[in-house]
Image (cartoon, grey):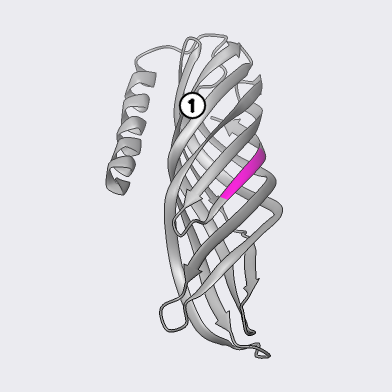
Amino acid sequence: MKKTLMISTIAAFGVLTGASSAHAQSDDENFEGVKVGVQAGWERRKIDETLLPAPNSARLNDKASGISYGGFAGYDAQFGSFVLGVEADFSPNGKTLRSTLPGGGSIELDSKWNASASARAGVALTPNLLAYGRFGYGLNRYTVRGFAAGNDTAVATDKVTGDGLIYGGGLEYAINRNASFRVEYRRNDNEASLGSNQVLGGLTLRF
């Protein structure tokens, strides 16, 4: 499934690039071209899962909220009112989730970074306002540590790159052909029941 999704995203990029060169951009097509941007917003992350290899396995059940930020790059092709695009993003921050264990000690999951590749499709409700949906594949790099009671040194550590699906949707408003703002809801469903809900605002520059 992972390979199929990645191949589909690459193929979509090729199709969009070829199709875009086959038509001239009209005056009211504000969502066309190569783009880069930054985004930031609120994230709520949670997990309820048994982690770490035996015999140090322990159940982590926690949730945390905070700021999420990062950057993205991609390509959009506009066909009248319809917009199709591909996008990759990266976020260098994450949340730390912790649980106290029965009998003392604790376990924590420390997220290091998140990245994703996704496709989006939308409809321009007006020449300057786009409503869109998103679907793709994400990665989350994190470290899991187990601690004995009264000990700040981890007795067990495991570094993991988890993966899963992302999906959501939002609105994007074009100031002109070269700049736009967007607001988006995004759901990340990672392995080991690790998931998050995000509300992100972004600034996009097109070339």
Q: Report the front residue among 71 and 115.
A: 115
**Would residue 110 be seen by someone viewing this image from the given angle?**
no
Crowding at dot 1, Cα within 10 Å, few <14 / some 14-19 / many 20+, comes out as: many
Q: Outermost residue toward the front?
A: 103
Q: How many labels does the image show?
A: 1
93 horizontally vs 54: left or right: right
Picture quadrant where residue 19 is located: top left
Residue type beneath disc 1: Gly
79 horizontally vs 207: left or right: left
Q: Is residue 199 magenta?
A: yes
Q: Where is residue 105 in the image (x, y as percent from the top left)?
A: 63, 83
Residue at image position (41%, 77%) is 53
Q: Where is residue 187 in the image (x, y as percent from the top left)?
A: 55, 42
Magenta segment boundaries in residue numbering: 196-200
Q: Report the front residue among 106 and 128.
A: 106
Q: Is residue 3 magenta?
A: no
Quarter that holds the N terminus: top left
Instruction: Quickly name the residue at label 1.
Output: 33
Picture quadrant where residue 38 is located: top right
177 horizontally vs 55: left or right: right
Q: Report the front residue among 4 and 56.
A: 56
**Is residue 99 positioned above or below 3 on the image?**
below
Q: Give the dominant element type of the magenta stretch: helix, strand or loop.
A: strand
Q: Where is residue 126 in the image (x, y as percent from the top left)?
A: 62, 10
